[in-house]
Image (spheres, rainbow, N blue to C red):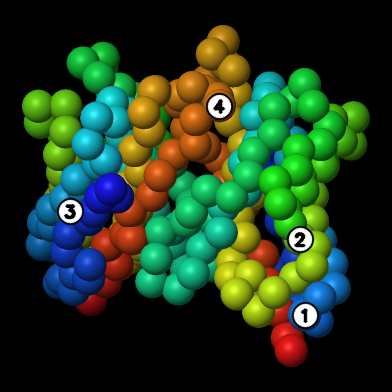
């Protein structure tokens, strides 16, 4: 049972344009969400996160939006740069009173390619 | 500062053999996690250590898998009688506080295990 889903395995965007990566989740006990970026042969690196009490968090070119009612979050990258080309993973965790506080549940990832 | 390191980076073994994978977390991090990523899949939680508490082993797929963490630092993941379906990238992550929602987990580069 995939509790965190990234339905787009790949995305191609032109340099300078906006990249939008989507993520859906099914577990209503999740209360914290993270995005990780992964280059080949490297471990995932933390990018940005958002708590369920917020609907938006911004860090430079990266913004994460959370729609709790729809159980949907998205990562916006503006403007996209060639160095952003990587696999992006969405991850979620629950609060201390759930069974998911001590681990991250990951989506399957979206491969972003930023073209010149 | 030094990040999470893992060894070996690649391991090829024959079916039925035992393997040990090593993780050196970031110095001072009390939380340590093991995940694995099979081909085309997201990261799958395996086990979590936090300080001197009993580990959360809820993600271990079978009793052939075990892990220990000595002295609150280095961890070893052991897979006994390896099977072909164990082939995956095994990722270790550490965090400065176990499960704290505002602190991300920092990943190592992973060990790619191939079982022939």
Chain bearing tag 4 is B
**Element under disc 1:** loop
Chain bearing tag 2 is A
Residue on which disc 2 sits = A77
How far apart are the alpha carbons under marks 3 and 4?
A: 28 Å
Cβ atoms under marks 3 and 4 closer than 8 Å = no
Quick one: label 2 or label 1, which is nearer the N terminus?
A: 1
Which marked residue is nearer to the observer: mark 4 or mark 1? Answer: 1
Residue drawn where x is 69% and y is 34% of the image: A50
Residue on which disc 4 sits = B102
Which marked residue is nearer to the observer: mark 2 or mark 3? Answer: 2
From the image, which quarter does the N terminus of chain A lie in?
top right
**Element under disc 2:** strand
Chain bearing tag 3 is B
**Element under disc 4:** loop
Quick one: label 3 or label 4, which is nearer the N terminus?
A: 3
Cβ atoms under marks 2 and 3 closer than 8 Å = no
How far apart are the alpha carbons under marks 2 and 3?
A: 36 Å
Judging depth in this view, the residue of B71 and B85 nearest the camera is B71
From the image, which quarter does the C terminus of chain A lie in?
bottom right
Q: Is residue A29 above or below residue A35?
A: above
Chain bearing tag 1 is A
How far from the left and from the top, in percent, is residue B6?
22, 55
Residue on which disc 1 sits = A15
Cβ atoms under marks 2 and 1 closer than 8 Å = no
Residue drawn where x is 18% and y is 73% of the image: B12
How far apart are the alpha carbons under marks 1 and 3?
A: 40 Å
The single residue placed furthest to the right in the displayed view is A69
Judging depth in this view, the residue of A89 and A107 nearest the camera is A89
Residue on which disc 3 sits = B21
How far apart are the alpha carbons under marks 2 and 4?
A: 22 Å
Judging depth in this view, the residue of B80 and B92 nearest the camera is B92
């Amino acid at each position: 049972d995939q509790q965190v889903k990234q339905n787009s395995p790949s995305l191609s965007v032109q340099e300078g344009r906006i990249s939008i990566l989507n993520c859906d989740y099914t577990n209503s006990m999740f209360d914290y969400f993270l995005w990780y970026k992964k280059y080949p042969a490297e471990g995932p690196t933390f990018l940005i996160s958002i708590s369920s009490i917020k609907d938006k968090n911004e860090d430079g070119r990266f913004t994460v939006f959370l729609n709790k009612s729809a159980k949907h979050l998205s990562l916006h990258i503006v403007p996209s740069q060639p160095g952003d080309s990587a696999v992006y993973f969405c991850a979620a965790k629950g609060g201390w009173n759930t069974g998911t506080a001590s681990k991250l549940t990951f989506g399957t990832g979206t491969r972003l390619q930023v073209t010149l | 500062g030094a990040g999470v390191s893992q060894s070996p980076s690649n391991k090829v073994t024959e079916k039925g053999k035992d393997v040990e994978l090593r993780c050196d977390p970031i110095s001072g991090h009390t939380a340590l996690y093991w995940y694995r990523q099979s081909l085309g899949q997201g990261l799958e939680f395996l086990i979590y250590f936090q300080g001197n508490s009993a580990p959360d082993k809820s993600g271990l797929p079978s009793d052939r898998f075990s892990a220990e963490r000595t002295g609150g630092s280095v961890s070893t993941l052991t897979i006994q009688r390896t099977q072909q379906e164990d082939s995956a990238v095994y990722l270790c992550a550490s965090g400065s506080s176990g499960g704290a929602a505002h602190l991300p987990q920092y990943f190592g580069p992973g060990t790619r295990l191939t079982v022939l």
